[in-house]
Amino acid sequence: MRHKHDFVLPILFFFVYFAWSTVLPMDKAPDEWMRYLIPLYIFDNGTLPLGDDPAIMSQNWGTSYGFQPYGASLIGFFFMKVTSFFTTDEAALLIATRQVSTISAAITVFLSIRIGHELFSSKFSPYLLGIFVGLLPQFVFLASYLNNEAFMLMCIALIVYAWVLGIENGWSTKVCVLLGVGLGLCAESYYFAYGYILVSILVYFVSAVHQMRHGYAVGVRRNFTGEGTVSPDVPAQIRKARNVRKSHGAIWAGALLILVVAVAVGGWFFVRNGLLYHGDIFGMATSDQTAEIYAAPDFKPSNHLSPDDYGVSPIQMMFGDPSAWNDKGATWISTTVKSFFAVFGYLNVKMGAWFYRIYLVLYCVGLVLLPLRFFRKKTSTGEKTFAFALLACFVLGVALAVYYSWASDYQAQGRYLMSTLIPLLIGVCGGYDALADKLAGLGKKPEQEPVGAHSVPSQQGVRIMHDGLAVRMLGMPARAWSWADILLVLVAVAVVALFVWTLQDAILPKCIGGVL
């Protein structure tokens, strides 16, 4: 089995997430009490709730999460149902629903590692990516209680993994179904991740059209010997792959398959919303109307002023004095960045300033090193497509969070930026991987390739690197361990140490107790 150790970190981290989910008080888990009302309603009544059902509505806000996609809560109901066969204790049922987040987080770590195997040249870099994702304190926090963010991150990781497979190996039926499932689940997660749905359209068509024009199928290069045939130097398992040029019809058939699967998985909720709320498929307008009627006076949308209502620009909101619309005394950017790394409870359990500085340094160093990856003769089309897709999703995620705080509801919370985590950390770890690879190559002379021979990655049995198709960031096969990989290990140790410090400084003394 390839990469047989890929399950180790996800399993270890799952037990960390699970342990915290059994002792995190609900009053330290933002909005969980409102989200928990949905699976509880389904458990008690056997039907899906209406958004304005008093059983799930907040008395203060006058609305509920029933208007918005609640895939995590719906899955939580099934965990609750299974648990009820053994006990109906309230704490046990709550913990059961939290397992949606713990399992989603563990799957996210696993998919991050698999993505890393496709992108990085060092054998340790994929696990560095898994550690960066899986032990980010805020990620661990989100993995411990019922919310949409942990489920959303799993969907994002699934989508990005499908991109990698599709760009590098071709858009087979299996990969199209995988992307469709990811998009459908993403639609049921969080609006902040919807940029991935839009960008997936670009990724699919750009890469599929490029593959059609150059005649790729299953990673086989059409003009491998210059005559459209596969060289006898290529291993047998590759020579068995047929070199088929896809037609425009096949591309549209793949797109249709992705669409059908996505709609089948996630479209039902929006159809239901449209039927229930007079065409309001996203439920936003109906939620605001409901809140205007039932919310407490200070919480009505008409009385809940945003920075935009005060005439403040988005830039002023992000970096300026927030005292006009927020009495917390910290800028939007400062509060958001800190809570992206580690702020627990209702933004009241924080780490020391030095903690955030170290994390910023680790991230910034990786991003500064990232250009090392592109200091070569030519960048592949697949590489450009993939890099642009990640950058676009990152920018869209930030833009949506900024716009929401500016125009709708001032929320300087890092969890609203979590949709950017996977692209950001791919960039960070890509920088460290590039540096390690450069250091490993110092003093080495490039091996001479025999005339007519072709480079076939030892660990990528059916993949042949090519200018227009390869996603691997350095355009080369995974290399063996070297002394330079000690750098990656040291970075991983730093990330682990930061989490251990968080555990003893904030989590254990301030964020455990009875769940109810």
Image (cartoon, rainbow, N blue to C red):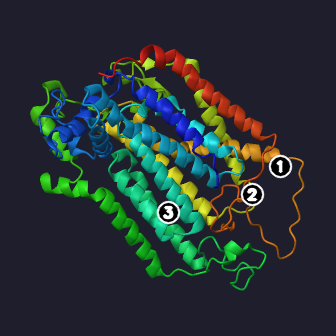
Q: Position of residue 328 (x, y in %)?
A: 36, 19
Find disc 2 in the rendering and name its residue.
376
Residue at horizontal 74%, vertical 82%? 226
The image quadrant that residue 241 belongs to is: bottom right
Badge 2, how many Cα within 10 Å: few under 14, some, many 20+?
few
Q: Residues within 10 Å of mark 1 (few under 14, many from 20)?
A: few
Residue 49 in the image: state x and y as whole percent.
Answer: 16, 44
Q: CA distance from mark 3 to mark 1?
A: 32 Å
Does label 1 or label 2 sit earlier along the sequence? 2
| Residue placed most toward the observer, 418 or 405 | 418
Q: Secondary structure at mark 2?
A: loop
In this orientation, which residue lies closer to the viewer: 172 or 386?
A: 172
> Which of the two residues, 288 or 309, is positioned nearer the viewer here?
288
**Residue 340 showing in the rendered view:** no
Number of marks: 3
Q: Are marks 2 and 3 in contact (CB under 8 Å)?
A: no
User: Could you tell whether 5 is left or right of 297 in the image?
Assistant: right
* The C terminus, quarter of image: top left
User: Which numbered marker is on residue 441?
Assistant: 1
Question: Would you say 462 lies left or right of 339 here?
Answer: right
Which sits earlier in the primary sequence, circle 2 or circle 3? 3
Three-letter amino acid code at the position of disc 1: Gly
Q: Amino acid at mark 2?
A: Arg
Q: CA distance from mark 2 to mark 3?
A: 23 Å
